[in-house]
């Protein structure tokens, strides 16, 4: 039984895969952003006026 791109199962799997990759990238970016915020926040705490 050949599965084509028109097959709903294939389309569903493709969407899940694409969504998973996008989600992972989003999480990595969020982690980077949080790291940057944390770093600058720590810097502000370390530098006493």
Image: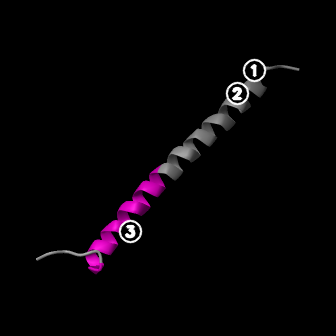
What residue is disc 2 on? 42
Q: Read off the residue under disc 3.
A: 15
Q: Secondary structure at mark 3?
A: helix
Q: What residue is at 58 percent from the left and 47 percent from the top?
A: 30
In this rendering, the answer to whether 20 lies above or below 38 is: below
Disc 2 + disc 1, Cβ < 8 Å: yes
- Whether residue 11 sits left or right of residue 49 in the image: it is left
**Could you say which disc has been placed on residue 46 in the image?**
1
How far apart, in angstroms, are the residues tagged by discs 2 and 1? 6 Å
Q: Which mark is residue 16?
A: none
Residue 35 forms part of the magenta stretch: no
Mark 2 or 3, closer to the camera: 3
Residue closest to the far right: 49
Q: Can you give x and y, in whole percent of width and height, for residue 12 in the image?
A: 33, 73
Q: Is residue 11 above or below residue 39?
A: below
| Residue lying at 27% horizontally and 76% vertically, measured from the top left | 9
Name the residue at 15% across, 75% down: 2
Instruction: Give the magenta part as a residue range.
Output: 6-24
Q: Position of residue 37 (x, y in %)?
A: 68, 37
Point out residue 38 in the picture as x, y percentages from the top left corner: 66, 34
Of marks 3 and 1, the one in the foreground: 3
Q: In the depicted view, which residue is nearer to us: 38 or 13?
A: 13
Mark pair 3, 1: CA separation: 46 Å
Query: Seen in the image, is 6 located left or right of residue 43?
Result: left
Q: Depth check: 34 or 17 in front?
A: 17
The quadrant holding residue 1 is bottom left
The quarter in which the C terminus is drawn is top right
């Amino acid at each position: 039984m050949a599965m084509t791109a028109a097959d709903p199962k294939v389309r569903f799997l493709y969407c899940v895969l694409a969504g998973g990759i996008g989600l992972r990238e989003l999480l990595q970016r969020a982690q980077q952003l949080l790291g940057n915020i944390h770093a600058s926040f720590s810097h502000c705490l370390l530098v006493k006026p």
